[in-house]
Image (cartoon, grey):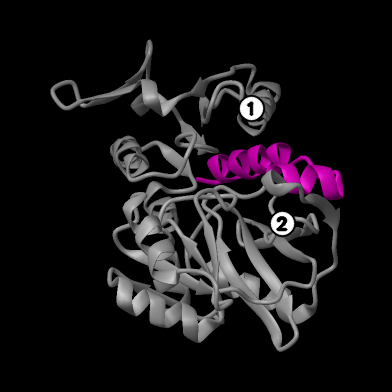
């Protein structure tokens, strides 16, 4: 048992948040699960309060989930955590690191600037340029700037029958003024989550797709399996995650015919994938990592 006071930023009722809070309680004897929708930043008193707890007085915070869905609103919550960090609280992962991954374009820019191979992608606010891009790709997935697990994504194929311009216009009017358009690439029935903790490799799970869906997400009927990635895929994923200085993350990778390609780096990592595919307790590993860092600070 340790005297460190550690809070978990997460969602009450969410399996991964509750599991992480349970692991903290096992190690510290205290359980503090913090929903940032209830947090109050008070500039006069220089504090961020969650109910009766001043987050600025804790030893550490572990960030699992900042909100139920990715949205620009989460950036404001992370700014509040940035203030908590400025008060001397250790936060895992750092708010500034997470901010770079909530916005899909920010992640893409960082990866591509570092020479990481990605699916061909165009970003534009022009419907005409978007239509040209989709026709050039043959089939494309339009992705919201803020989303996870394929939520809000739209597949458009140039099959000679689809009114591509109308589909693009509808996507834009659904709240996507700047459109992120990615070529639909052939996926060999699965894509990978390659997981790292403190920059060290933990394991890999595969999301195996339902044949009735174009994507492999669990929300679309996919399931997790254990997988041993190629050494090239593992090295590439390590390079990708190292760009963001995260404590715990998973890198979405496809092992294509011409080599591995990165889709994105996760801000929060895949607890479910590790548990279901590999029997690994990610929460326990993360808490041990945090305690080790605190003891050596």
| Residue at x 38%, y 12% (from the top left corner) | 51
Q: Is residue 46 above or below residue 80?
A: above
Of all residues, the one furthest to the bottom in this rendering is 258
Q: CA distance from mark 2 to mark 1?
A: 38 Å
Quadrant of the rendered image containing residue 47: top left
Magenta part mainly helix, strand or loop? helix
Camera-side residue: 194 or 30? 194
Part of the protein shown in magenta: 271-297
> In the rendered structure, does residue 274 fall within the stretch colored magenta?
yes
Residue wearing tag 2: 213
Pair 2/1: label in front: 2
Residue 261 is drawn in which quadrant? bottom right
Q: Residue furthest front?
A: 161
Q: Write down the residue under mark 1.
A: 24
Against 51, residue 219 (above or below) is: below
Seen in the picture, residue 222 relative to 59 is either above or below; the reply is below
Coordinates of residue 128 in the picture (x, y in percent) = 31, 77
Looking at the rendered structure, the secondary structure element under dot 2 is loop
Image check: 56 left or right of 34?
left
Q: Residue 191 versus residue 155: which sits nearer the camera?
A: 155
Report crowding for label 2: few under 14, some 14 to 19, many 20 or more residues within 10 A (C-alpha). few
Q: Is residue 30 found left or right of 168 in the rendered image?
A: right
Is residue 211 visible to the viewer in this orientation of the structure? yes
């Amino acid at each position: 048992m340790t005297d460190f006071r550690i809070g978990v930023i997460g969602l009450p009722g969410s399996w991964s948040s509750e599991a992480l809070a349970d692991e903290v309680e096992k190690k510290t004897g205290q359980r503090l699960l913090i929903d940032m929708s209830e947090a109050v930043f008070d500039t006069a008193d220089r504090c961020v309060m969650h109910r009766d707890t001043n987050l600025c007085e804790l030893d550490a915070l572990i960030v699992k989930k900042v909100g139920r869905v990715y949205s620009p609103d989460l950036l404001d919550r992370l700014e509040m955590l940035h203030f908590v960090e400025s008060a001397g609280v250790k936060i895992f992962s750092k708010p500034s690191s997470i901010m770079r991954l909530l916005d899909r374009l920010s992640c893409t820019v960082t990866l591509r600037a570092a020479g990481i191979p990605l699916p061909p992608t165009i970003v534009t606010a022009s419907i005409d340029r978007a239509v040209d891009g989709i026709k050039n790709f043959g089939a494309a997935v339009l992705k919201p700037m803020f989303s996870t697990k394929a939520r809000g994504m739209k597949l458009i194929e140039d099959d000679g029958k689809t009114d591509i311009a109308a589909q693009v216009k509808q996507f834009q009017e659904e709240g996507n003024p700047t459109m992120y358009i990615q070529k639909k690439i052939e996926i060999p029935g699965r894509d990978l989550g390659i997981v790292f903790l403190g920059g060290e490799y933990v394991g890999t799970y595969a999301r195996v797709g339902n044949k009735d869906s174009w994507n492999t997400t669990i929300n679309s009927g996919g399931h997790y399996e254990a997988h041993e990635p190629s050494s090239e895929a593992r090295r590439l994923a390590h390079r990708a995650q190292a760009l963001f200085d995260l404590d715990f993350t998973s890198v979405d990778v496809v092992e294509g015919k011409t080599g591995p390609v990165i889709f994105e780096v996760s801000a929060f990592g895949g607890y479910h994938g590790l548990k279901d595919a590999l029997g690994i307790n990610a929460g326990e590993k993360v808490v041990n990592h945090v305690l080790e860092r605190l003891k050596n600070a």
